[in-house]
Image: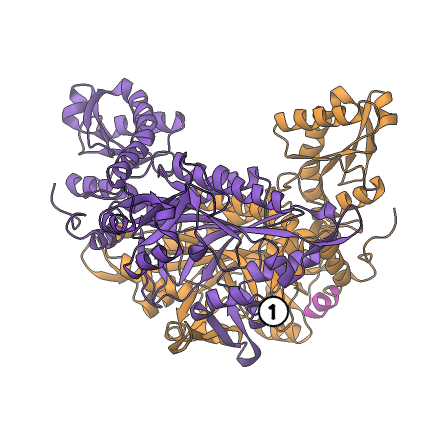
Chain colours: A purple, B orange
Amino acid sequence: MARVLTPRAEDFPRWYQDLIAKAKLADNGPVRGTMVIRPAGYAIWERMQAEMDARIKAAGAENAYFPLFIPESYLKREAEHVEGFSPELAVVTHGGGKQLAEPVVVRPTSETVIGEFMAKWIDSYRDLPLLLNQWANVVRWELRPRIFLRTSEFLWQEGHTAHATREDARAYARRILHEAYEDLMVNVLGIPVVVGLKTARERFAGATATYTCEGMMGDGKALQLGTSHELGQNFAKAFDISYSSAEGGREHAWTTSWGTSTRMLGGLIMCHGDDNGLRVPPKLAPVQAYVMIVKDGEGVGEAARKLHDALRDAGVRVALDDRTDTAFGRRAVDAELRGYPVRVEVGPRDLAAGNAVVVRRTDGSKAPTPVADVVGAVLAALEADQQALHDQALEFRRSRTVEVSTLAEAIEASATGWARVPWSAVGVEGEAEANAQGVTVRCLVRADGSVPDSEDEPDLVAILARAY
Amino acid sequence: MARVLTPRAEDFPRWYQDLIAKAKLADNGPVRGTMVIRPAGYAIWERMQAEMDARIKAAGAENAYFPLFIPESYLKREAEHVEGFSPELAVVTHGGGKQLAEPVVVRPTSETVIGEFMAKWIDSYRDLPLLLNQWANVVRWELRPRIFLRTSEFLWQEGHTAHATREDARAYARRILHEAYEDLMVNVLGIPVVVGLKTARERFAGATATYTCEGMMGDGKALQLGTSHELGQNFAKAFDISYSSAEGGREHAWTTSWGTSTRMLGGLIMCHGDDNGLRVPPKLAPVQAYVMIVKDGEGVGEAARKLHDALRDAGVRVALDDRTDTAFGRRAVDAELRGYPVRVEVGPRDLAAGNAVVVRRTDGSKAPTPVADVVGAVLAALEADQQALHDQALEFRRSRTVEVSTLAEAIEASATGWARVPWSAVGVEGEAEANAQGVTVRCLVRADGSVPDSEDEPDLVAILARAY
């Protein structure tokens, strides 16, 4: 097969850009830093959304929608918060043909406006917990944009909850972390994320604890795929989110927030993509089986359509490619680029022998298969390849992760992958030193892999890496 | 039952605002003209979206996402288009802490940016038709906002398609009009819309034909619930959307656009709401059956939970209200306000006789029902009430529509409802005269009710009304 993309080993960032363009996933928008998500990319995002939305709802949160425009004054209420965002804001100064009396900000997050309304809606302990989620676009001006990873506008979900106690808030932030985020990433996206606690330095502005899901990309770097924050009573105090308790007093609530975004599309590409294009895990793939007519011939069209219908009836998301006026080779290259998990190629020669060819994107295997056995073979391939992609990524992560005992070794190892090093060997000063060399502490985990409550726990392991 | 809302007959606009506030559907946002869609309102919007999205996909269109920010220069390319929008634009002048070299506009529609990308993506006739849809927020600065009906920011879907011929474009604009819009509105929202052609005066800026779905609200006014436009080659020429034909020449494409928005929520409220609150058609309702524990008593909680589970297992969207620490009367008023189609009330007295009470929101009927028969009774009520709400609205529209033969009579009749009058008795001058008195031609239909191709057809009927 002719070279379609810059090979990953040659230039990983270039490969990433090539893939996005040639698989028609997205384009750069006309305003710097914005993106156009094309149908092939958006269809994957829609399935991520649907899977995530179901998990968020299962955790009891309800969707709502808050306005795009936020008064500038709102962002100034929580000092740490505004410091975190001010250099990134887009400001609307004119509306309806006139200069506005007070400029409004295009939301970089809805934290402040949701805080304002939580304060209005919460009166008594009976109103708690209040569990809200929103699917929306947000804007953070980007000087060095990269499609899906850092764009001036991106799509995301942001959850915001208020609870009566610190324990409830903590339990909910962790429930979303594990039951929604980790579960989606591992079991649908097939990305074996490490789940841990951020250090104070890496914590979200205003949070008392930030939990994260970190994935290893194909170049050994880390990508933060989702975070969940405990905000303590910081936001509740800034926005006066309070409730009358069962005992009759007035208490500030404890809040959380958590988000995942179109950045997950970038993670999917960089975790599973290969030199021929994207590979999409079957559970996520908008098209799981791609039935292709190789070229016209006796009974070929009919056989292909029957296979298409049989796969559809078996619950497979299937598409039929009968564009025989386009060269088969070109169509096959496109199918590889798009990452359809299974192709079913139907052509005159194989069909004469009673076969269609089942091609698996994960390992490139091509199996001539009796037509009557195709549905079963496709179902088996989809099942196996969901796991295979995850396991390949896990194996790759293991091969690129080293256990070291000093900061110097950890920084050195970060050139090609991740380093696991005792947090006691890094500490706040060591973290600053690593940062100066472009290496960050991605998260802290316990020796048994579980998520710590605090960075002060003994025997924590720090994961150091370069990151997107 | 105590008066909860301003009665419709007393003050319809006030009733509308009251209902939205007390049913917790939405709030005004902090920036004038914006809205917060609360979970109870958003859940209905999500179901409208899902039903619409399925219909749009069935018509072959694919979802994509285009940027929020559009260069000012794009809007100037199509003169008629910019005239239609310029007084409504929100303009971002600062981004990332600096004044921008070129201000960017917050999209009032994505027509122009999608046109720009269609021009890039379409090369040959093989690329046609190109059928795109987008779910997004848009901004049109509103000086007289009203929640759901006219807000500075609203949520919508906008479809944009390009075709090789005028006939293909027309057929597609009409396919969306009937198979997506009319079907959703009539069969899911239960709103008996009239579907027709807009006059030249009411047409979308730049369109060659605008088709519309018009519903009658509870005060006899009309609401435009969705439009589908043929844009001829106007946009294709402005944005150079062209293709090489099978014969080898270069031709401009023919384009369409079509949209529906959160305005449908306003239409739903004003079509079906009564003096006790919202009434939601069962197919649309996020909660179809609301099982309420009237008060605690022997076996009550268990019976309620069993009914909840049995309804859920029968495929009913069901919620359980066991908040017996809140007065039953107050909870029942809330349930009326929210418009749950069926309530199942479980209390000690009825349960002692083996019954639960099935309350239908549509007609207020209360039927003590043997517990074993409740699931069947609920399913029957949901089926019947979907139709009943539609039929009531149709009957109301008929009662408020008059057939007249002169413009003067039509204008007079518009004070309380709709007038059907020969278009030949109105014409362009009569339309201007009606407009001066606050009455508009909502649409033109043929005598048999079908949608005309042009306002020049003979024997057309004009529908005149006051409108939102």
Q: Is residue B412 magenta?
A: yes
- Chain containing mark 1: B
Q: Which residues are magenta?
A: B406-413
Query: Which percent across, then down, holds residue A10?
Result: 14, 51
Quick one: quadrant of the C terminus of chain A? bottom left
**Under tag 1, what secondary structure?**
loop
Residue A84 as seen in the image, left or right of residue B275: left
Residue A307 falls in image quadrant? top left
Q: Nearer the viewer, residue B342 or A187?
A: A187
Q: Residues within 10 Å of mark 1 (few under 14, many from 20)?
A: some
Residue B10 vertical position relative to residue A344 in the rendered view, above or below = below
Residue A388 falls in image quadrant? top left
Query: Which percent across, then down, holds residue A320?
Result: 30, 35
Residue A430 falls in image quadrant? bottom left
Query: Which percent across, then down, holds residue A354?
Result: 20, 19
Decide if residue A290 is in sight here.
no
Residue A328 as seen in the image, left or right of residue A257: left
Label 1, on which residue?
A: B31
- The three-letter amino acid code for the residue at tag 1 is Val
Decide if residue A175 is in sight here.
yes
Residue B366 as seen in the image, left or right of residue A263: right
Query: Which percent across, then down, holds residue A375?
Result: 32, 23
